[in-house]
Image (tube, grey):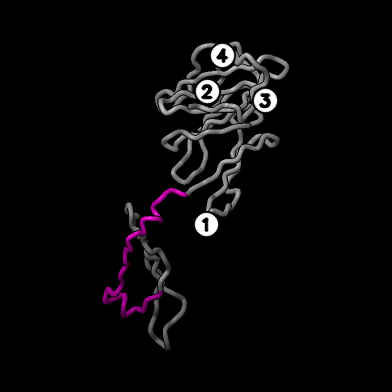
């Protein structure tokens, strides 16, 4: 796109402002910019745009750190720099309707979903992770009844089972099991299993 410029080049030679753009292609970084060209250059068609190969490291998705905020009922998304430093928060993602007090979190093996235990509502929140690290499509999934209270620790198996430790304040501890179904939907399976103890905490699940 080219527009005449109000400025002139010298006494009589008109200049033009050109907005140079192109459709992005995978693995290619295109320069998009305003450039100033003379009328003579425009008439001669002297205008070129170069496509530069994007470095391999630039094509990698950004590394992010998810932090559960129990008191403010949301998740912080921090960007991890190349040197390991943290920048942000880039985003504060709220819990889904009915979800309260996020506590522990685990990411799916393919990196596309984040599962968060909800202490205040005894359920699990499932978030979709975009290619840029943003969180979206949050939903709350309740375990099989009888509904436990105070969901705490979480652990995810390679074959797609999610275990959630239930603190159950003033009651016996238990563990709920979810199956990760199509599109990583969570499906509760079976009754919560008693631990034989009391109040399993958010760091108390270890798979071997």
Label 1: how many Cα within 10 Å (few below 14, some 14–19, many 20+): few
Q: Residue furthest bottom?
A: 11
- In the picture of the structure, the residue carrying the numbered disc 1 is 83
Q: Please provide percent x and percent y for residue 9.
A: 42, 84
Mark 1 or mark 3: name the one nearer the start of the chain: 1
Mark 1 or mark 2: name the one nearer the start of the chain: 1
Label 3: how many Cα within 10 Å (few below 14, some 14–19, many 20+): some
Q: Nearer the viewer, mark 4 or mark 3?
A: 4
- In the picture of the structure, the residue carrying the numbered disc 2 is 163
Q: Which residues are magenta?
A: 36-62
Mark 1 or mark 4: name the one nearer the start of the chain: 1
Secondary element at image label 2: strand
Label 2: how many Cα within 10 Å (few below 14, some 14–19, many 20+): many
Q: CA distance from mark 1 to mark 4?
A: 43 Å
Q: Which mark is residue 120?
A: 3
Residue 58 included in the magenta stretch of the image: yes
Residue 15 included in the magenta stretch of the image: no
Q: Which mark is residue 193?
A: 4
């Amino acid at each position: 796109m080219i527009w005449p410029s109000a400025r002139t080049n010298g006494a009589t030679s008109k200049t033009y402002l050109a907005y140079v753009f192109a459709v992005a292609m995978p693995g290619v970084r295109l320069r998009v910019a305003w450039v100033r060209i003379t009328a003579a250059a425009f008439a001669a068609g002297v205008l070129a745009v170069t496509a530069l190969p994007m470095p391999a490291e630039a094509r990698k998705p950004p590394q992010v750190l998810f932090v559960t905020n129990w008191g403010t009922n949301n998740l912080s998304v921090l960007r991890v720099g190349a040197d390991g430093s943290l920048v942000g928060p880039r985003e504060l993602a709220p819990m889904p309707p009915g979800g309260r007090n996020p506590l522990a979190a685990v990411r799916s093996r393919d990196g596309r979903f984040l599962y968060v235990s909800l202490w205040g509502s005894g359920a699990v929140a499932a978030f979709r992770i975009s290619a840029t690290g943003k969180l979206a499509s949050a939903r709350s999934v309740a375990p099989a009844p009888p509904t436990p209270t105070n969901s705490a620790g979480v652990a995810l198996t390679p074959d797609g089972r999610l275990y959630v430790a239930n603190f159950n304040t003033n009651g016996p501890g238990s563990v709920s099991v979810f199956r990760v179904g199509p599109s990583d939907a969570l499906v509760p399976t079976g009754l919560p299993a008693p631990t034989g103890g009391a109040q399993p905490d958010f760091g108390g699940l270890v798979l071997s």
